[in-house]
Image (spheres, rainbow, N blue to C red):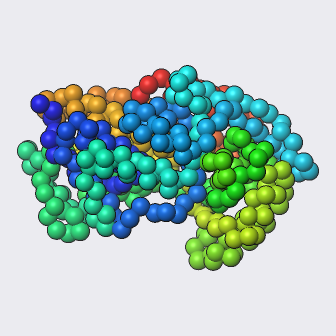
Amino acid sequence: MAAVQKVAIAGAGAAGLAAGIQLAKAGVTVDLFEAQPQLSALGSGISLQGNALRAFDTLGAWDDIKAAGYPFEGLHLRAPGPGAPVVAELPDVKTGGPDYPAAMGMPRPDLARILLEHAQKAGVTVHFGSKVTGLDQTDAGVDVQVNDAPAGTYDLLIGADGLNSSVRDLIGIETKPEPTGMGIWRTFVSRPAEVVRSELYYGGPVYIAGYTPTGEDSMYAFLVEKAQDRVGVSDEEATGIMLDESRAYQGPWESIRADLEAGAHANYTWFTKHIVEEPWNRGRVVIIGDAAHSCPPTIAQGAAQGLEDALVLTELVLAADQLDQGVWDAFHARRLPRATAVVEASVQLGQWQLEGNRDADAGGLIFGIAQQMAQPA
């Protein structure tokens, strides 16, 4: 018999839904509690590396995700200024192996919808508008409170509730995300026919300007700048800022600006970093995904690392006949070094930009991490 028969999960992001899918497929009763009233239909795009695509296949969701996204190979670097010339064409490491594209872009809401559908099909009971607000552990289980009311007793509570995790706070882990000094503007726009892969522009008025195709008719574009206080900026002002900061970039940016002028929404967030270096569990409660680690999206591994957390955790839990220290030691041995390497590399790439370090071997760092990620978690 598996070590768990009834599991609670906090958070309906990729990591939480992936854990729910794997557990429910194995016959475990799963209650997933999501604080938001529903999955958001808003959002820009997401870049997914091959190891994330391999994870989706393990979940049984790859065919649906492949149909909803835009697979591509390679990365182009362009220069700012007239004509936006391509200055480098970089091959991607197939981190998922030869059976998957090197990378894929897709709309975030579509990814969330597909994973939710697969979780519900597997048998996960999803409770929206339900925040985990308390817990009490015994030797036999975890008494979970949701919205300040008893929700049940579970063999395991998985905190996959994001950067500002309430579960992380409830188990006394004090590590929290810290700003890295960079902020990012994002917008979701139409895809010009010439955009068939991710392209990045280095130099000019911002650190990085770029875009990734997310579908036959869509892509998301972004500008990475020095982190600023953008609280209270109106939608109109946000669009104006993104228009102004992008004017040094030509090529497909002409189409992006046309969409912004026609009403495409711009949103802003800061980059954060953190890694919980101590064990991610306290007894029968464990955090995964953004609750345990976060980093700038400079190597597009955030979602992949959360998915790997979920798959490794559920593999070990389902193979064990009791939830003992051996399970946690194996989990941390497989996840902590890998997630730490991704966080440190992602932060280093951003720091080199902040410092204006033109001699740094960014390509070598990216390639080295990609080779690590090509090995199964």
Work out which residue is located at the far right of the displayed protein and give it: 82
Residue 116 x %, y %: 37, 51
Pick the front one: 277 or 170? 170
Pick the front one: 23 or 62? 62
Quadrant where the N terminus is found in the figure: top left
Pick the front one: 355 or 88? 88
Total labels: the figure holds 0
Quadrant where the C terminus is found in the figure: top left
Residue 47 x %, y %: 58, 44
- Looking at the picture, does residue 118 appear above or below residue 376? below
x 53%, y 24%: residue = 99
The reply to whether residue 354 is visible in this rendering is no
Q: Write down the quadrant of residue 100 in the picture.
A: top right
Left or right side of 119 for 5: left
x 38%, y 65%: residue = 38
x 36%, y 54%: residue = 12
The reply to whether residue 104 is visible in this rendering is yes
Residue 164 x %, y %: 39, 59
Pick the front one: 269 or 243? 243
x 88%, y 51%: residue = 81
Residue 283 x %, y %: 18, 43
Left or right side of 194 for 44: left
